[in-house]
Amino acid sequence: MKLVTAIIKPFRMDDVRAALSDIGVQGITATEVKGFGRQKGHTELYRGAEYVVDFLPKVKLEIAVADDQVEATIEAVIKAASTGKIGDGKIFVTPLEQVIRIRTGETGEEAI
């Protein structure tokens, strides 16, 4: 089992969710986060004053999948989240040692 963590642009969230649903991913956790990478923020004008926006809004998706779904999950996120511009995001894949469904007590892949 793996935990796929994707940091994406907020306006791509619905497309990514639909793409994951199409390949059979049953659940994701989404969190609104802020951060920066190569974009390094930007300046904006508000009521005549210029100010720097250091941290840009992003959405962090956490997707627990079986080992055989990892590549399909990554491909679905890349296709749905890509705009071809800087700041599209990152995907991290980490191993999951154990998953437990609280309601039923199921463990392992059955709990995903």
Image (cartoon, grey):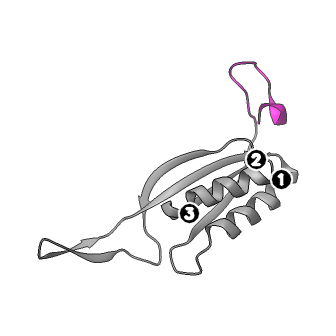
**Magenta span contains residue 11:** no
Q: Amino acid at mark 3?
A: Arg
Magenta residues, as a range?
Answer: 98-112
Image coordinates for residue 89, horizontal then vertical, percent: 56, 68
Q: CA distance from mark 3 to mark 1?
A: 21 Å
Q: Is 64 situated above or below 84?
A: above
Image coordinates for residue 85, horizontal then vertical, percent: 54, 81
Figure quadrant of the N terminus = top right
Report if the CB atoms under discs 1 and 2 are less than 8 Å apart. Answer: yes
Q: Label 1 neighbourhood size at 10 Å, few (<14), some (14-19), many (20+)?
A: some
Q: Nearer the viewer, residue 36 or 56?
A: 56
Side of 4 where 33 appears, left or right? left
Image coordinates for residue 41, horizontal then vertical, percent: 36, 74
The image quadrant that residue 80 belongs to is bottom right
Q: Which residue is mark 3?
A: 12
Q: CA distance from mark 1 to mark 2?
A: 8 Å
**Magenta span contains residue 99:** yes
The image quadrant that residue 5 belongs to is bottom right
Q: Secondary structure at mark 3?
A: helix
Identified at 54% across, 54% down, the residue is 60
Q: Secondary structure at mark 1?
A: helix
Q: Which residue is mark 1?
A: 69
Q: Amino acid at mark 1?
A: Gln
Figure quadrant of the C terminus = top right
Q: Amino acid at mark 2?
A: Val
Q: Which residue is mark 2?
A: 25
